[in-house]
Image (tube, rainbow, N blue to C red):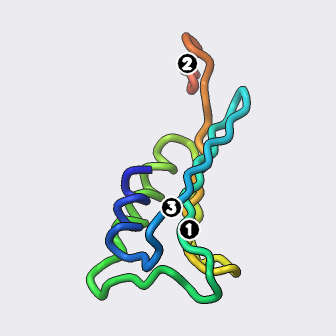
Amino acid sequence: MQEALINVTKHATAHSAEIRLTYSPDRLSIAITNGTGTGPAFSPAPDSGYGLIGMRERALSAGGRLRAGHRLQGGFEVVTELPLHPYGVDPAPAT
């Protein structure tokens, strides 16, 4: 979430962002969306690109996934889905 919000302040023409948290017993979904209008509200700087790579790597290392991109209605969205493990249960039992 932190990296996605930093990207909003660095790259977006939008002045706000929306954060949606959705959860189920086994999964947490986090969506950061900025911009609405008709055109893209995100224009990466020439030296950028590692933020999204780092977010994707962190999501994968936790067993989750991440998608990011321009929205048809304008703006940009970053969505990650992360697995939730019950307290006290080893998520990867030894074999």
What residue did someone put label 2 on? 90
The residues bearing labels 3 and 2 have C-alpha atoms spaced at a distance of: 35 Å
Q: Nearer the viewer, residue 29 or 85?
A: 29
| Image location of residue 29, percent across then percent down | 63, 45
Q: Callout 3, which amino acid?
A: Ala
Pick out the residue farthest to the top: 88
Q: Nearer the viewer, residue 7 or 94?
A: 7
Pick out the residue farthest to the front: 15
| Image location of residue 18, percent across then percent down | 56, 57
Residue at 53% in and 68% down: 34
The residues bearing labels 1 and 3 have C-alpha atoms spaced at a distance of: 14 Å
| Marked residue nearer the N-terminal end (1 or 3) | 3
| Marks 1, 3: nearer the viewer | 3
What residue did someone put label 3 on? 17
Q: Callout 1, which amino acid?
A: Ala
What residue did someone put label 1 on? 68
* Quadrant in which residue 33 is drawn: bottom right
Query: Do the residues bearing badges 3 and 2 touch, measured as CB atoms within 8 Å?
Result: no
Q: Callout 2, which amino acid?
A: Asp
Dot 2 alpha-carbon crowd within 10 angstroms: few under 14, some 14 to 19, many 20 or more? few
| Vertical side of 73 occupied by 34: above or below | above
